[in-house]
Image: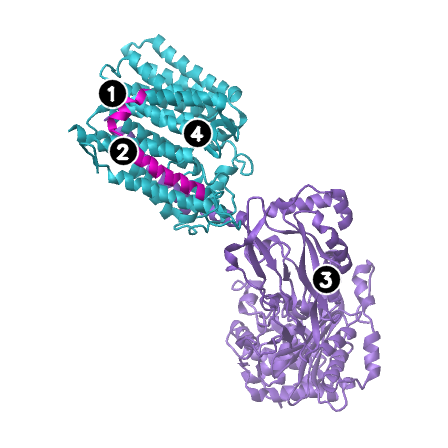
Chain colours: A cyan, B purple
Amino acid sequence: MAFGKSIVRFDWITIVLFLALVAIGWMNIYSASLSDSTAGFFDMNQIYIKQLVWIGLSIVLIIFILALDAKFYERFASIIYIVSLLSLIGLFVFGKNISGATSWYVFGGVSLQPSEFAKAATALALAKYVSDIQTNMNEFRHQLFAFLIIALPALFIVPQPDPGSALVYAAFVFPLYREGLHFVYLLLGFFAAALFVSTLAFGAIWVMLAVLLATVLVFLKNRKRRPNLLKYATIAIACIGFAFSVSYIFNNVFEQRHRDRFNIVLGKEVDAKGIGYNTNQSEIAIGSGGWFGKGWTQGTQTKGNFVPEQHTDYIFSTVGEEWGFAGSLVVVALFVGLILRTLVLAERQKNQFSRVYGYSVAAILFLHFFVNVGMVTGLFPTVGIPLPFFSYGGSGLWGFTILLFIFVRLDGSNYYYT
Amino acid sequence: MRKLLLLSLVLITGVVFAGRLFYLQIYDTSFKQLSDNNAIKVIYDYPQRGYVFDRNGDLLVSNQPSYDVMVIPREVQPFDTLEFCNLLKLNKESLETILEKARVYSPRLPSPVIPQLTKAEYAYLSEKMHKYEGFYIQKRSLRDYQVSHSANVLGYIAEVNDRIIDKNPYYQMGDLIGMNGIERQYEDVLRGVKGVKYIQKDRFNRDIGPYKDGIFDTLPERGKDITLTIDAQLQKYAEELMVNKRGGIVAIEPATGEILSLVTAPYYDPALLVGRERSKNFTKLYYDTIAKPLFDRGLSGEYPPGSPFKTLTALIGLEEGVIDAEERISCHGGYVYGRGRKLGCHHHSSPLAMVGGIANSCNAYFCTVYRRAVEKYPTPQEGIDRWNNHLSSFGLGDFLGYDLPSGRPGFIPDAKYYNKIHDYPERRWYATATISNAIGQGEISLTPMQMAHFTATIANRGWYYKPHIIKNVEKVDTIPNVYKEKHHTTIDPQYFTPVVDGMHDVYNNGTATRLRIPDIEICGKTGTAENYTKIDGKRVQLTDHSIFIAFAPKDNPKIAIAVFVENGYWGSRWAGRIASLMIEKYIKGEITRTDMEKFVLEGSLEEEYAKPHSGEPFRINI
């Protein structure tokens, strides 16, 4: 393909993986939303027809994205980001409340979810800032600004409320790390997460005792080197303070439904009929698939609508039930393949902007994949985020399509610079 | 290093997910069953149980519709408990107990609330049932007995218990199963196979059509009809004769091994164990530990066989060559052995050869024969084992292999047993220590079934078919091959002639001369067995058991019979009369000796049975 004077080669592996995921995704949406109603196949009210329209339109979108000059995305990154932020802020005024969250604009019969598009915008802005010649990721001021770029959209998304979508922004820590952010930040983040989970699982008191014990042991072990007592005390107090504030926030700020979701995954509550219903039904559906599944549209759990939200966040349970272990592995492999391919391409980029952006794409896809499949298979708390290219929803599909194909476009222009 | 972090996380995640999927989909099968449970409702269609006929094609057992109120706990919606309890004539507490038990069994599978409604109750309830979600009425078929006899043969059906459900997955709570008699023995044949429908349900528990368009659904298969070898007329007559007596009667057709009659007394009406009164009636029968109506004396009553056993002693003596049929043995009021010990005998002419010995039931004669047979061998151990071996060839001392689920093996002692009770080898024992065996007392015990069986074997002059009660299934001759195999005893057929002649003489000039039946050549043997019970820990002797074995006609025998009447005193008093009447009834179809019939029908031994329970001293054998 030739666009103007440049020589452009798009990465066909990425495109084929994308098409495969979208196609398989649609087949499962078809099965999950199939009802016994007498309406014809081409009834516009059928979910699978709507999704088919969204897929068709996304092809148009892809052509448009690929047709634009690669320079456009770098040059207009800041503007795209600001527009995106404004669209998020605008929700507070014009947003439509659908099932408890004010996350949508509704135009006629079409609803759009700006938070799905904000990921791509944030990735562009972050790539632009990090790749700026004056930015040094080892300088605290620059680190702070990078975090601000990431945190702003998340801050607007949380109160919609949509903590799940906000969580996705944590993915941006991976491109930052790749570009030189100190490992301590990751360690801190990981340590905080570990403290968080153990506080919920065992209670703040036990975490406090464990932290104190660990501090004393390390202190005694290092006492020949005359350790700084104050330093140890500070770290221990910080940890304990964190544990207690987590406990406080969990019990007083979180809503009961959030608490329930964590408790189920931590095994503190086994209530198959109540709040754990989703996860339990999803595990049952997947578990009933066996080696090769019950066959397309033959799933008894899928047909009986036992898994709520099966065509959206829980679409993977349909894969598990109807395509079995073999089919599920294929889907997992496709996702792992797409993410790895994106990573490899990102590393191959000659300019830093493309690399950071590509890394962000991989990180976001990974986080979605990790959280969603983890949730559906009962490994992770119930966090409502979609499975990229699979879950029903126009905004989601378009958001990921844009995210991925801007990178395909950037990657394609690689040759332009050489 | 920085390049590898996300890369490795992605790969690790892929592997972890693959592992988790393997666990959910392949390793842990419980998820598969859960899925089947909550997406699919199973509806059963119960077939009619097979009918039961007697050997002449008379219908004994058919079916009647019955209606159970069932509950599927998870489908129950809040309902008017009070009204519901009034409808079912239940109190609130017992309803709650029933519902709790159903929940514990399974929230998804049906459990019975009230089993076996009457038709009137059903009609009344079925109008109101729609108000109570989760409850429904399940139609089943219950037994409808056409006869009021043979309860011990027919058995009964009842709801399966937890143990059966655990063992056999075919059955579910509320299903019926044969619990005794032929209902239990031929459960698989009579039951048929229940049909099943799988209904796909959605998560609001609404039916959304047959699962996979019904490819797994099955139609119920009707139970097969069976015909028994029992003669219902004879059976009914036998029960009438046993009124107010206790004991067992078994009649066998010698040529085939078919059981013509199997009676235990006291007995009960099989209709008692049908319907809602079933458990109440059953409890009543079960806890009657004195009369024991549920105890099948014909199959499980182990009694000392008494004098009829002398026929076997004679056969063994002849086979071992220790006596000649013509040899006369004198009797001086008993048999003297050891150091002045004497086994008494009654008054009869002496000396006697074999025919006379049997006809007059001479104790001295048979003790002599027995002792010779045992002492023929160098040690008493060998002699006893040899003797035991002959009896085993008749099938005695073991279950006979008949097709009924209850029964006892009886007991024929062997050398090992005597070694143990006599503390061998510290102390030695001799044939004389076991001399009571000669006359069917001592350690031997046999059931009426075994008595009838060896009588049939003697009638056949040395061979038998295993006794059985199944004649055919669905009118087609499909009895198991084990009942078509001819078995031979260790006794040479020629030796049966003097024994049969002796049994014939029992009627002509022996102990049963007054029981003769005109025009029928009967062979028989009386028996009178001493027996004991324990009252307050003390061994107390009771009135003797009245025993009789017989077969007729002498040549080409049609029926062999053993009759046991507990505490009926001497053999011809009750058992002999009953045996004669039954033989006449079976062969002639009518009774000529109505005076004898009247005596038996009206006679009662209840006074005798009350003695040990009266708490007062009593006299026996009067």
Location of the N terminus of chain B (image quadrant): top left
Mark 3 vs mark 4, CA separation in Å: 69 Å
Which dot, 1 or 2, sits closer to the camera?
Answer: 2
Question: Are labels 4 and 1 assigned to the same chain?
Answer: yes
Q: Which residues are magenta?
A: A49-78
Q: Determine whether label 1 and label 2 are within 8 Å by CB.
A: no
Residue position for label 4: A113
Q: Nearer the viewer, residue A310 or B255?
A: A310
Q: Earlier in the sequence, mark 2 or mark 4?
A: 2
Which dot, 2 or 4, sits closer to the camera?
Answer: 2
Query: In the drawing, does residue A340 fall left or right of residue B496?
Result: left
Find numbered disc 3 in the image and state the secondary structure of the residue it sits on: loop
Query: In the drawing, does residue B90 fall left or right of residue A311?
Result: right
Q: Is residue A83 above or below residue B95?
A: above
Q: Residue at x 34, y 45 (%)?
A: A330
Q: Quadrant of residue B327?
A: bottom right
> Where does the image place residue B2, in percent across and percent down from the top left?
24, 25
From this viewpoint, which residue is outermost toward the front? A4
Residue position for label 2: A67
Query: In the drawing, does residue B429 fall left or right of residue A224?
Result: right
Q: Is residue B290 above or below residue B303?
A: above
Which mark is drawn over residue A131? 1
Is disc 3 surrounded by few (<14), some (14 to 19) or many (20+) residues within 10 Å?
A: some
Q: Is residue B210 magenta?
A: no
From this viewpoint, which residue is outermost toward the left? A418
